[in-house]
Amino acid sequence: MTIKELRTITGLSQRAFGEKYHIPTRTIENWEGGTRKPSETILYLLERAVKEDYNMVYVIIDDCLSRKAAIFDERFDTKEEAIQTAEAEWKSFTERDKNSRDAYYVATCTIDEDDEIDWDSINPIVEYK
C-alpha cells in the first residue's frame, strides 16, 4: 500500500495523519508527491498501525480448488458494494470458464495485531457441481 492509500483508509488529512503517527507533514507531502519515497520498513509499520487502529475489514473471495483469493478492502464505501463487485467479477470469470471451479465463497474477516485473519463468516456465492 502507498502512504496515500493508508491515509485514505484513515480519512485523515496529511497534517492529522502526520500528527497521529509522528511524521512531519512535509515528509508526507513529499512521499505522496513522489519527491521522496518511504522505506519498505516504514510502509510496513504504518500499514500495521493503520490496520490495528482502524480494524480494517476485508472481503475475501476464495475458490476452493486453487486457494487463490482476491481481496477487496475498505476502498469500497460499504461491504455490500465490495461483495457486489466481487460477485460481478466472479460471474464475469465463470462466463469465460464455467468448469474451472467447483465453488466460490465470500468471506469477511478482520486482521488482528499479529496480522492473523479472524474469520467473521463464510458463505458460498455460486456453487457448481
Image: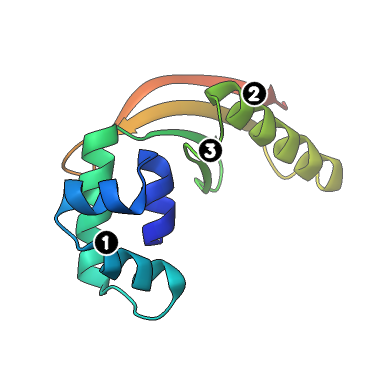
Look at label 3 and name its amino acid. Answer: Asp
Q: Which residue is mark 2?
A: 125
Foreground residue among 114 and 123 = 114
Q: How is the image coloured?
A: rainbow
Q: Is residue 120 above or below residue 6?
A: above
Q: Name the secondary structure under disc 3.
A: strand
Name the residue furthest right: 95
The earlier-in-sequence mark between 3 and 2 is 3
Please name which of the two marks, 1 or 3, marks the residue nearer to the observer: 1
State the residue at coordinates (49%, 45%): 67
Where is residue 19 shown, x and y percent of the image?
18, 50
Q: Which residue is mark 3?
A: 62
Look at label 1 and name its amino acid. Answer: Thr
Q: How many C-alpha atoms fall within 10 Å of the one at disc 3: few (<14), some, or many (≥20)?
A: many
Q: How many C-alpha atoms fall within 10 Å of the one at disc 1: few (<14), some, or many (≥20)?
A: some
Q: Residues under labels 1 and 3: Cα distance? A: 39 Å
Q: Is residue 33 something that shows in the picture?
A: yes
